[in-house]
């Protein structure tokens, strides 16, 4: 049996550089794994099956099953697996949970089936599953380019505390496409925000709110009705400028200490907001699942 943690992520920067001829957008992003994790268990079986703590996610198009089928087809493997997915990451809110689960599936089944697929080949397969999946093959901190398939892991290990707020808004699987359609070309950048943040992280300097950037913040308030109210609550509780997590609507603030994060989390939970205090994350080996309220 193999058991892995699948971490969520935030985009410390997310820039769109251009619209590509293939219909995708060219991005540059500084991505960071955080310690809010799903847990996946892989056991030998005759067929590939998935059991999830949220039964509505057990559909045939779940990225976990897509990744498992792709790995088996691409390697000629005839084995199966019983996959159990314990969800802790809120889904369809910009935290990359589905993509992380898919990456963990590629890695977990590679171990279970004793395939020995090189990491670069796993990353190539990950790109066929989804744009964010290659990042999670590497995890930690990385610069991501292209449509997400080019991942440059960093040796730096920034120690950051963040408070995540998940707005009580309807979840839509098509919201990322809506956000991209809402972007104006004059919001495109040349990667300068990522370069500045990367320089600080690489030199061991702390990041502050002013170093973060997400182009989707220009369009998100028009796409997510009610986001402005949650944004304001997070800003008032923390005294910091919030930032969108990926394509949202989850948002987050950086906290100077765990103690500050605990105070902010307490304030928001008293307002019945779904809130998580999280930290940057670099180790997917599992001893016990993260304790989440």
Image (tube, helix red, strand yellow):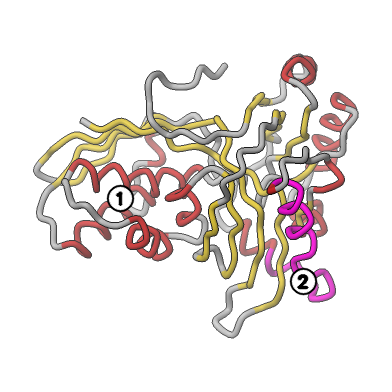
- Of the numbered discs 1 and 2, the one sitting upstream in the chain is 1
Mark 1 lies on residue? 65
Give the residue drawn at x 63%, y 72%.
Answer: 25
x and y, in percent, of residue 212 in the image: 79, 48
Give the residue drawn at x 50%, y 53%.
Answer: 135
Give the residue drawn at x 73%, y 58%.
Answer: 194
Is 198 within the magenta? yes
Is 189 within the magenta? yes
The residue range painted magenta reads: 180-201
- To which quarter of the image does residue 15 belong? bottom right
x and y, in percent, of residue 180 in the image: 68, 66
- To which quarter of the image does residue 227 belong? top right
How many discs mark residues in the rendered view?
Answer: 2
Mark 2 lies on residue? 190
Q: Quadrant of the N terminus?
A: top left
Q: Nearer the viewer, residue 137 or 229?
A: 137
x and y, in percent, of residue 44 in the image: 14, 37
Q: Quadrant of the C terminus?
A: top right
- To which quarter of the image does residue 289 belong? top left
User: Foreground mark, 1 or 2?
Assistant: 2
Q: Is residue 223 above or below residue 59?
A: below
18 vs 34, left or right, is right
Give the residue drawn at x 62%, y 50%.
Answer: 31
x and y, in percent, of residue 255 in the image: 78, 28
């Amino acid at each position: 049996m193999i058991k892995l943690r699948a971490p969520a992520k935030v985009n410390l920067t997310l820039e769109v550089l251009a619209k590509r001829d293939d219909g995708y957008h060219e991005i540059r992003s500084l991505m960071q794994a955080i310690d809010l994790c799903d847990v996946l268990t892989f056991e030998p079986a005759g067929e590939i099956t998935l059991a999830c703590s949220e039964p509505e996610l057990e559909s045939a198009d779940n990225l976990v099953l897509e990744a498992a089928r792709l790995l088996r087809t691409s390697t000629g493997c005839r084995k199966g697996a019983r996959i159990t997915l314990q969800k802790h990451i809120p889904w369809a809110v910009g935290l990359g949970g589905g993509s992380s689960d898919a990456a963990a599936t590629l890695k977990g089944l590679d171990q279970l089936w004793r395939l020995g697929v090189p990491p670069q080949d796993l990353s190539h397969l990950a790109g066929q599953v989804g744009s964010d999946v290659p990042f999670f093959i590497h995890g930690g901190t990385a610069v991501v380019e292209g449509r997400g398939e080019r991942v440059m892991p960093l040796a730096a290990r920034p120690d950051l505390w963040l408070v995540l707020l998940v707005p009580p808004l309807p979840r839509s699987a098509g919201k990322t496409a809506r956000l991209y359609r809402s972007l104006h070309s004059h919001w495109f950048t040349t990667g300068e925000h990522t370069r500045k943040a990367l320089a600080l992280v690489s030199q061991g300097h702390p990041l502050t709110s002013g170093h973060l950037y997400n182009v989707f913040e220009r369009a998100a308030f028009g796409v997510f009705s009610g986001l402005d109210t949650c944004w304001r609550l997070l800003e008032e509780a923390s005294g910091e400028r919030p930032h969108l997590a990926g394509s949202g609507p989850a948002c987050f603030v950086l906290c100077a200490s765990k103690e500050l994060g605990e105070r902010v989390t307490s304030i928001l939970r008293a307002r019945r907001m779904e809130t998580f205090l999280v930290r940057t994350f670099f180790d997917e080996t599992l001893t016990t699942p993260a304790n989440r309220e």
